[in-house]
Image: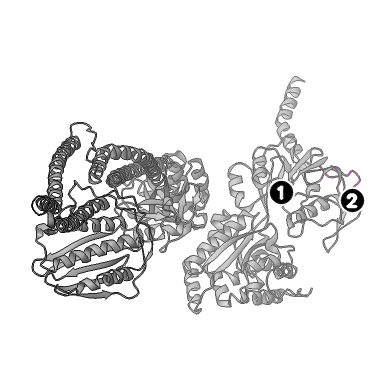
């Protein structure tokens, strides 16, 4: 008896860690997911229009949590609160508390609630992640490396945002194809990716990333900066006079500013005078404000993993800034059609791809089953659960 | 101008000259003192600037060295010394490190000169700063000025370089401070001075690059010429700027090119020394001098007047005394003040007048005696002539009465006739003397002198050609339109009559009597000339003296009367005579005689001027 008992005790003692580990991998219900976002959402009413793209994106993420389903056109259907969460507390532009919807058709989410703190600056979000004051926050790509070095759990998506220099429609009489190509050739994209983006990104050659189109390598930039500078000088040699260009960037986007300044330095080496100019927040995407600048640094998100749709959306966004063929590709367009359109646009050098950057998220150690959303998808908070005793990083 | 006025003016001129001299001297001395003060201020400010500049250099060097010696920097250097090290990790480090060390510029530069991280130009990572690798020993170099290209354009920095060596590879830490108005604000400026800094970052003068303690200086273009001179030839120079039309707004600028003793001027330190205070004080001194001078002049004026009066009073008294003496007041005396030259002069004057009075009295006494003697002689002579016939006649009457009674009646008749005649002569003599003593006062009325002359000549026409005497030919040369004169016609008639009688007596052998009238500016002139025997000079001098005569008969009163009449009419008479040729009397009578004074009869006992009266 005692030997059996001793044997059982030993078995239990041996099995306990295995049981604990098994229990830890099982989703856990409960807990409040603390989320911080940079946008200040002023209203959740469908009839109100967001003030800027950042608020638009935040509204989309929130709507995806409180509405039941999303249609193909991107709009949400159903009543507010019919989604996995319902609004529990709402302080416009400050804080939103969502409670788990017990009657959600897709099943109750794991977390009991989500507290979304709004209008949090990037450095504050990063600091809160470091101090474990929040469970989830978006991180700027250039801060990802630094955050990881400081112990923040970082989640990175596929490169799904194109940073590009787009010549404005108003610069047509000032910039020739050769000048635009020279500017494109002079830019050291690798340096931008390695230094400014801190390797959280990669040089862009085409309008679609390699992992979507499979053809981006065909638009690869020149191998070395020296080659690019030489090519730019060669191109400018054909022009009797090189105009002085003004490059605008979103004043609220430090990444765009850093890239713009680097481009100005690269261009200067090639003999092109570019001065940078800060534009009002969000104005970089509006063509009206571009009348004062010859080009702008734009960040265009890829909205779909389908090449045709993605390219059409990229061109539609770019068309608000420059003159480009933005007609939607037919639904049955094949890879060659997409490549042909992309090649035709690239030939004009009105859109100069610079780098691809992913979406970077900071997570606390207790967040489980987080997967970065694919292009066109929203944050999957309904599938996330919180580890009550976080053991290790996911 | 009186002597007092001259003396007063001389005193004032001397005073003015002294005040002006003192004012100019004070102004020049004060200006020189202010110039020296300004130079001292400028020198002190330059020294202060150089001390501050050196201090900043040491501070910058110390900070950069501190960064290089930090553990993080050493770790960076160690990391970068490894093969295939990731440089991009450090691309943003310069910003944070520069802020923590309060540096405006900071670059981490790799062994090959490539920028690893840059504070002032973050986008220039990867590009090379070749000059960093060319210097072997940065530790001994110290801080220096450097033109730095930034995203905001070129700037001027006080730069130091420190090296972190790991193995055979160097990591260069290039850091510094911006040289701008903040640097100027650390200087303590004396009153009236200011410091400017020109950043010589462009080939041409840029007004925006001229800074004062608060930013770009105003009216910077006015200093363009000085800056441009320094750009061509960097050396300490100065220039005076007048900021407005008023000289008080002048400012002296002293320029020191930086770095010193270098052909490549990167900055220009300017010390402006306002001339405002100096000029204001100079003006104040000048106005004070003017005010003091004015007060001094006023006092000087009064003192000069008092001194001039004090000095000239004895002289004026002397002048007055002299004038009194000249006017006949020989008893005039001058007060004697002190024993100086003027006092001695007054004393001498008084003595002289005293002697004159005494001599005059003696002379009068002598003249009086002589006159009485002359009168006695003349009376004796005049009375002797009638008395002798009277005596003879009376004796004849006695003889006839005693010895010839029959003829007595006839003798008696003849004798009584003679007696009556001679007594009449005596009465005539007495009447002449009486008339002379009773010269009447002229009664003036418009008189035609020509008419009087003609009447007198007509009166004597019979005597001119009287039988038994050589004829006298009268010649009248009377100016037509002779103006009427205010005169007593009777007295003038009598005077001219005397002159004609005198001429007739002078021409016993006949001759020509010429009477001429003429008109001068304010007078009429009458000339009465004869061709007689003429007068000796002695006679000419004494001819108007009463009772003096050169003739055997006559009272000697005729010409004295003429002189008295002429004098009573405010005129003058003179005589020209040449022995053997003739005599000519000239009478000048004023057309409008001054108010007639009662002229006493010529002092018969006093000698009068004879040749002209």
What label sits on residue A38 in the rendered view? Answer: 1
Q: Is residue B214 above or below residue A28?
A: below
**Chain ID at mark 2:** A
Closer-to-camera residue (B478/A198): B478
Closer-to-camera residue (A310/B572): B572
Magenta span contains residue A95: no
What label sits on residue A80 in the rendered view? Answer: 2
Side (left or right) of B507 relative to B144: left
The residue shown at (58%, 46%) is: A146
Closer-to-camera residue (A292/A302): A292
Residue A352 position, x and y percent, is 61, 69
**The image quarter in which residue B569 lies:** bottom left
Residue B590 position, x and y percent, is 32, 62
What range is drawn magenta here?
Answer: A101-110
The crowd level at tag 1 (other Cα within 10 Å; few <14, some 14-19, many 20+) is some
Residue B110 position, x and y percent, is 42, 52
The crowd level at tag 2 (other Cα within 10 Å; few <14, some 14-19, many 20+) is some
Residue B166 position, x and y percent, is 38, 45
Per the image, label 1 sits on a secondary structure element best described as: loop
Side (left or right) of B80 relative to A122: left
Q: Earlier in the sequence, mark 2 or mark 1?
A: 1
Which circle, 2 or 1, is nearer the viewer?
1
The residue shown at (49%, 79%) is: A240
What label sits on residue B548 in the rendered view? Answer: none
Give the quarter of the figure containing the C terminus of chain B: bottom left
Per the image, label 2 sits on a secondary structure element best described as: loop
Q: Same subunit under labels 2 and 1?
A: yes
């Amino acid at each position: 008896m005692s030997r059996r008992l001793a044997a059982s005790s030993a078995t239990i003692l041996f099995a306990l860690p295995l049981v604990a580990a098994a229990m830890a991998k099982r989703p856990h219900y409960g807990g409040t997911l603390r989320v911080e976002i940079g946008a200040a959402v002023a209203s959740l009413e469908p009839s109100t229009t967001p003030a800027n793209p950042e608020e638009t994106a935040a509204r989309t993420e929130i709507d995806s949590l409180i509405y039941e389903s999303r249609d193909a056109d991107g709009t949400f259907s159903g009543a507010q609160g019919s989604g996995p969460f319902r609004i529990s507390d709402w302080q416009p532009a400050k804080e939103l508390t969502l409670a788990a919807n017990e009657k959600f058709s897709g099943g109750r989410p794991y977390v009991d609630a989500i507290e979304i703190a709004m209008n949090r600056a990037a450095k504050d979000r990063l600091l809160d992640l470091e101090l474990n004051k929040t469970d989830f926050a978006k991180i700027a790509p250039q801060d990802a490396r630094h955050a990881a070095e400081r112990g923040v759990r970082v989640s990175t998506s596929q490169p799904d945002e194109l940073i590009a220099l787009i010549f404005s429609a108003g610069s047509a009489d000032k910039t020739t194809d050769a000048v635009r190509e020279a500017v494109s050739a002079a830019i050291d994209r690798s340096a931008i990716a390695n230094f400014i983006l801190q390797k959280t990104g990669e040089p862009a050659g085409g309008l679609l990333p390699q992992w979507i189109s499979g053809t981006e390598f065909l638009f690869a930039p020149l191998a070395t900066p020296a080659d690019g500078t030489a090519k730019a000088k060669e191109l400018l040699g054909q022009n009797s006079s090189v105009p002085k260009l003004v490059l605008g960037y979103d004043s609220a986007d430090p990444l765009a500013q850093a890239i713009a300044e680097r481009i100005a330095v690269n261009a200067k080496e090639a003999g092109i005078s570019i001065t940078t100019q800060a534009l009002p927040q969000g104005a970089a995407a509006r063509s009206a404000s571009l009348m004062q600048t010859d080009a702008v640094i734009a960040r265009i998100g890829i909205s779909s993993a389908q090449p045709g749709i993605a390219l059409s959306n990229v061109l539609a966004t770019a068309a608000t800034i420059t003159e480009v063929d933005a007609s939607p590709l037919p639904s049955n367009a094949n890879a060659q059609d997409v490549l042909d359109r992309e090649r035709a646009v690239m030939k004009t050098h009105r859109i100069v791809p610079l780098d691809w950057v992913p979406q970077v998220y900071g997570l606390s150690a207790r967040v489980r089953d987080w997967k970065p959303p694919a292009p066109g998808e929203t944050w999957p908070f309904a599938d996330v659960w919180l580890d009550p005793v976080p053991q290790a990083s996911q | 101008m009186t002597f007092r006025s001259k003396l007063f003016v001389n005193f004032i001129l001397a005073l003015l000259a002294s005040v002006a001299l003192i004012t100019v001297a004070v102004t020049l001395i004060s200006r020189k003192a202010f110039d020296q003060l300004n130079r001292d201020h400028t020198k002190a400010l330059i020294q202060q600037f150089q001390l501050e500049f050196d201090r900043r250099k040491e501070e910058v060097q110390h900070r950069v060295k501190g960064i290089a010696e930090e553990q993080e920097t050493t770790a960076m250097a160690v990391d970068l010394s490894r093969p295939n090290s990731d440089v991009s990790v450090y691309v943003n480090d310069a910003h944070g490190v520069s802020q923590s060390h309060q540096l405006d510029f900071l670059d981490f530069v790799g062994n090959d000169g490539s920028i690893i991280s840059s504070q002032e130009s973050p986008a220039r990572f990867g590009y090379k700063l070749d000059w960093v690798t060319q210097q072997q020993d940065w530790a001994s170099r110290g801080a220096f000025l450097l033109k730095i290209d930034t995203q905001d354009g070129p700037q001027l920095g006080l730069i130091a370089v420190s090296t972190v060596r790991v193995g055979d590879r160097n990591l260069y830490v290039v850091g510094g401070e911006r040289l701008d108005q903040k640097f100027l604000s650390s200087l303590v400026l004396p009153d009236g001075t200011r410091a400017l800094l020109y950043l010589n970052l462009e080939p041409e003068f840029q007004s925006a690059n001229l800074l004062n303690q608060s930013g770009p200086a105003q009216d910077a273009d006015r200093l363009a010429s000085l800056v441009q001179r320094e750009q061509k030839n960097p050396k300490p120079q100065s220039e005076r700027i007048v900021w407005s039309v008023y000289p008080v707004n002048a400012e002296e600028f002293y320029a020191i090119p930086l770095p010193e003793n270098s052909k490549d001027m990167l900055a220009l330190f300017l010390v402006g020394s306002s001339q405002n205070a100096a000029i204001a004080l100079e003006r104040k001194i000048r106005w004070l001098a003017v005010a003091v001078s004015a007060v001094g002049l006023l006092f000087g004026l009064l003192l000069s007047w008092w001194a001039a009066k004090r000095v000239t009073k004895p002289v004026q008294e002397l002048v007055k005394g002299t004038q009194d003496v000249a006017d006949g007041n020989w008893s005039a005396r001058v007060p004697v003040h002190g024993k100086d030259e003027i006092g001695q002069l007054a004393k001498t004057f008084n003595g002289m007048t005293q002697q004159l009075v005494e001599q005059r009295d003696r002379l009068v006494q002598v003249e009086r005696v002589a006159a009485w003697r002359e009168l006695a002689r003349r009376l004796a002579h005049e009375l002797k002539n009638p008395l002798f016939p009277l005596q003879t006649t009376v004796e004849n009457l006695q003889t006839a009465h005693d010895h010839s009674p029959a003829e007595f009646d006839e003798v008696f008749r003849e004798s009584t006739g003679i007696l009556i005649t001679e007594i009449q002569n005596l009465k005539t003599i007495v009447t002449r003397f009486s008339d002379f003593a009773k010269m009447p006062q002229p009664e003036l009325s418009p008189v035609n002198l020509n008419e009087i002359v003609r009447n007198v000549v007509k009166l004597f026409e019979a005597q001119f050609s009287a039988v038994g005497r050589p004829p006298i030919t009268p010649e009248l040369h009377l100016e037509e339109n002779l103006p009427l004169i205010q005169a007593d016609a009777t007295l003038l008639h009598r005077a001219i009559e005397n002159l004609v009688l005198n001429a007739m007596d002078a021409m016993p052998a006949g001759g020509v009597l010429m009477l001429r009238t003429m008109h001068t500016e304010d007078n009429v002139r009458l000339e009465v000339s004869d061709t007689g025997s003429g007068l000796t000079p002695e006679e000419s001098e004494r001819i108007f003296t009463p009772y003096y005569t050169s003739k055997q008969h006559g009272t000697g009163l005729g010409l004295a009367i003429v002189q008295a009449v002429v004098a009573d009419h405010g005129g003058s008479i003179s005589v020209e005579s040449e022995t053997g040729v003739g005599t000519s009397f000239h009478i000048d009578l004023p057309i409008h005689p001054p108010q007639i004074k009662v002229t006493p009869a010529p002092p018969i006992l006093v000698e009068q001027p004879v040749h002209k009266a």
